[in-house]
Structure formats: structure tokens, C-alpha cells
């Protein structure tokens, strides 16, 4: 599978010019804290001294999971199509937040086990993945098609920011499996309660996921691992992340499942991580560890564990704020303010 080339997302001379501009704004040196680092990152992603956010797109990638038939979630599988309909009707948390923040909302059906909902984008691969505890969740051809669908979707969307959301009962299981295979950490360190399984549910989830790892132990390349452990929405999202980074769009990452898509995209096309802003640290147990492993620090920590892109939408206003601070704040020189003592 051919992926687009990535531009240089960390040009040192540009970084030095932007840092100089930030350091000469009318504030004590470094006083805007991590907003300064965010402004610098956005400048490097766009390759300009004055980045600006334009026409942000929030995409919810939705799909069903064969694993969900094994009792790994606190909620029934029907919730996936029901919540897709709720998102399109405007009643889901992500719908409300997207409206409030002026984010265009796209719901991409990557393989929900129900007829295509009116208003959803048709990126369907199949009616849910196969049960990964018994073998590969999807074929290599299906994984390649999902990646391609994700790439093509971003090419059709306007703007320079992609906010990631997802919906899929059972998808914390797929994300945990990917975390285990991509980090090598013990499975128990990669599994959390998802929608809220109790202690017995968590033990069951762990046992089923151990079966899935055993059933797919032969998968080696990142594409094979993606196909084996699955998630049509996760693989499609990984394709979209690669396209977005290639086009110098900032990718705003939501919670645990969207982080799985980033880790997969980074394994497939090293370098995409530089285009990613991590919105929040999810309450899903293993998320903090995965972020640490990726060497990134999320903007917010609100104990969210909803998914849908809700955390990405909540963190969103910090991005345009960082841009206007960089472009519009006066410098000590332009405002005639005395700088610190040498
Ligand atoms: O974003 C997160 O960190 C997150 C953490 C836990 C659950 N979720 C959402 O809950 C669903 C998956 O949970 P589960 O228990 O069915 O695997 C899926 O629709 C996700 O959007 C999302
Ligand atoms: C109601 C509900 C809403 C969701 N949104 C994302 N995942 C979800 C899971 C459930 C169960």
C-alpha cells in the first residue's frame, strides 16, 4: 500500500523564528506556558510563522466489532447504530459540542452492523468485523480498503484541522489489543473498563482479549496487525490521519481509541505524530501510559471517557486561541513596553 509523503513538520529555522516572536511578546518570558508550545507546533505543522485555523472538521468514525458479541462491553451492540442516528439527529454530546464550537460534523460509517443511516458518509467495509478472538478481525484487503477510504475522505474535506471522534461498541477492546501489540506492554496494562464493565466484566474482557492475541500471534507487519486486531473505524481513521499530516492539517486526537489510530498511523507512516495535538487524557485506565509511551502530553485532563470526539471538541478553542496570540499580540518593541532586565 502506497502512502503519501509527509512534508518536514519540524523545520528548525522556522522554529527559531517563531520561538523568537513568542519570546518577544508582551508577557514575562514563557508565561503563556503550554499555549506557547501549541502555537509553535501549529506554526511548524502549517510551515508558516502565523498559523491560522480554518474550517475545522470533526469526523466521527463508526463501526461494529465482532468481539462485542463476546461480552466485552457494558452496553449492547445495537447502541452503535442508535448513537450514529443520535449524532446525526443532533442529540449526542459531540453534536451539541460541534454546534457550539462551529465545527463541521461528519459521521463516517466504516462498518456499522445496520443499514446506512441517512446523512452518514458511506465508508462501509462490512457489517462489523469478524470476532478477533477466533482469528483476524478483517482480511488484509479489507484493511487496505479502510486505509484508502480514510485517505480519500480527508481529501474531500475542506479546512486545515481534522478532529477525530469515534463510535463503536467494543472498540476499547480493539484499541487495547493494538496497544499491546504496538507497545509490547503486558495485556493487563493495556485494558480498561471502556463503557464501564464491572470487576467480573473486566476479568472476562481480559480473558477474551488474551484469546484474540493468541489467535492472531502470527500477524507481524503493521498492516497485518491492523487487520488482525481490527476496528474498521480505527483503520479508516489511521488512513485519514496519514492524509491529514501529508496535507499539513493539524490532527486533534480525542481519547483512547483515537490514540490507537494515531499509534497505528505512526507505525504505518512514521512522522505523522508531529501533526497531532492530543486533546485530553481519557479516564480509560491505560490511556495515560500510552500517551507517555508516545512521548506526548495532552492539553486537558477532565476524566472524560465518552469518545465521539467530545474531548477533541472541548479542547478545540485552545488552538485558534494559540494562533491569535502568536499573530496578534504586541511585542515589547511595538508596544513600547520595557522588557526584562538583561
Ligand atoms: O475515548 C475514550 O477514551 C473512550 C473510553 C471508553 C469508552 N469510549 C466509548 O465507548 C465505546 C467503547 O466502549 P466499549 O466498552 O464498548 O469498548 C465507544 O463507542 C467509545 O466511543 C471511549
Ligand atoms: C450511550 C453511549 C454513547 C456513546 N458514545 C460513545 N460511546 C458510547 C457508548 C454508549 C453506551
Image (cartoon, grey):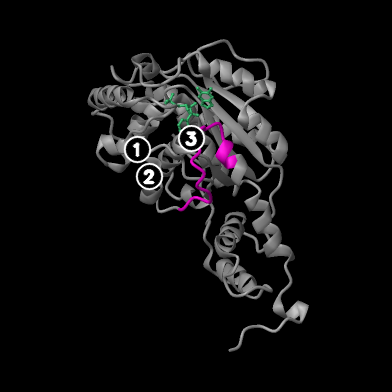
Could you tell me which secondary element the residue under label 1 belongs to?
Answer: helix
Which of 26 and 196 lies nearest the eye of the viewer? 196
Which of 2 and 291 lies nearest the eye of the viewer? 291
User: What percent of the width, then of the height, locates residue 338?
Assistant: 70, 84
**Image height check: is 342 above or below 238?**
below
Q: Nearer the viewer, mark 1 or mark 3?
A: 3
Dot 3, crowdedness within 10 Å: few (<14), some or many (≥20)?
Answer: many
Instruction: From the image, give the main secondary structure of the stretch colored magenta.
Output: loop
Which of 296 and 49 lies nearest the eye of the viewer? 296
Could you tell me which secondary element the residue under label 3 belongs to?
Answer: loop
- Residue position marked by numbered label 2 in the rendering: 290
Where is the N terminus found, in terms of image quarters? top left
Dot 1, crowdedness within 10 Å: few (<14), some or many (≥20)?
Answer: many
| C-alpha span from label 2 to label 3 | 15 Å
Dot 2, crowdedness within 10 Å: few (<14), some or many (≥20)?
Answer: many
Question: Does the CB distance between marks 1 and 2 fall below 8 Å?
Answer: yes
Lower position in the chain sequence, tag 2 or tag 3: 2
Where is the C terminus found, in terms of image quarters? bottom right
- Residue position marked by numbered label 3 in the rendering: 305
The label number, if any, that marks residue 179 in the structure image:
1
Lower position in the chain sequence, tag 1 or tag 2: 1
**Image height check: is 38 above or below 126?**
below
- State the extent of the magenta-drawn residues as a range: 297-312
Amino acid at each position: 500500500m502506497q502512502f503519501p509523503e509527509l512534508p518536514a513538520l519540524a523545520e528548525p529555522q522556522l522554529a527559531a523564528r517563531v520561538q523568537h516572536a513568542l519570546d518577544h511578546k508582551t508577557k514575562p518570558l514563557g508565561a503563556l506556558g503550554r499555549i506557547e508550545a501549541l502555537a509553535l507546533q501549529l506554526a511548524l505543522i502549517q510551515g508558516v510563522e502565523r498559523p491560522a485555523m480554518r474550517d475545522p472538521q470533526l469526523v466521527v468514525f463508526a463501526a461494529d466489532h465482532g468481539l462485542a458479541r463476546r461480552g466485552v462491553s457494558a452496553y449492547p451492540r445495537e447502541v452503535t447504530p442508535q448513537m450514529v442516528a443520535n449524532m446525526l439527529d443532533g442529540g449526542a454530546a459531540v453534536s451539541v459540542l460541534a454546534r457550539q464550537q462551529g465545527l463541521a460534523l461528519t459521521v463516517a460509517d466504516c462498518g456499522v452492523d445496520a443499514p446506512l443511516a441517512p446523512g452518514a458518509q458511506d465508508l462501509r467495509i462490512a457489517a462489523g468485523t469478524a470476532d478477533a478472538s477466533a482469528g483476524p478481525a478483517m482480511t488484509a484487503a479489507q484493511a487496505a480498503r479502510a486505509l484508502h477510504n480514510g485517505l480519500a475522505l480527508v481529501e474531500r474535506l475542506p479546512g486545515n484541522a481534522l478532529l477525530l471522534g469515534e463510535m463503536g461498541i467494543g472498540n476499547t477492546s480493539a484499541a487495547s489489543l493494538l496497544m499491546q501489540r504496538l507497545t509490547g506492554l503486558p495485556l493487563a496494562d493495556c485494558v480498561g473498563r471502556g463503557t464501564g464493565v464491572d470487576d467480573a466484566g473486566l476479568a472476562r474482557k481480559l480473558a477474551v482479549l488474551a484469546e484474540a492475541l493468541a489467535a492472531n500471534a502470527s500477524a507481524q507487519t503493521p498492516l497485518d496487525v491492523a487487520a488482525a486486531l481490527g476496528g474498521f473505524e480505527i483503520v479508516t481513521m489511521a488512513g485519514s490521519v496519514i492524509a491529514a499530516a501529508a496535507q499539513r492539517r493539524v490532527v486533534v486526537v480525542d481519547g483512547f481509541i483515537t490514540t490507537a489510530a494515531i499509534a497505528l498511523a505512526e507505525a504505518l507512516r512514521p512522522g505523522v505524530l508531529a501533526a497531532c495535538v492530543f486533546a485530553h487524557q481519557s479516564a480509560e485506565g491505560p490511556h495515560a501510559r500510552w500517551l507517555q509511551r508516545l512521548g506526548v502530553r495532552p492539553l486537558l485532563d477532565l476524566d472524560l471517557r465518552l469518545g465521539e470526539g467530545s474531548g477533541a471538541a472541548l479542547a478545540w478553542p485552545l488552538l485558534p486561541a494559540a494562533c491569535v496570540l502568536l499573530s496578534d499580540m504586541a511585542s515589547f518593541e511595538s508596544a513600547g513596553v520595557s522588557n526584562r532586565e538583561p
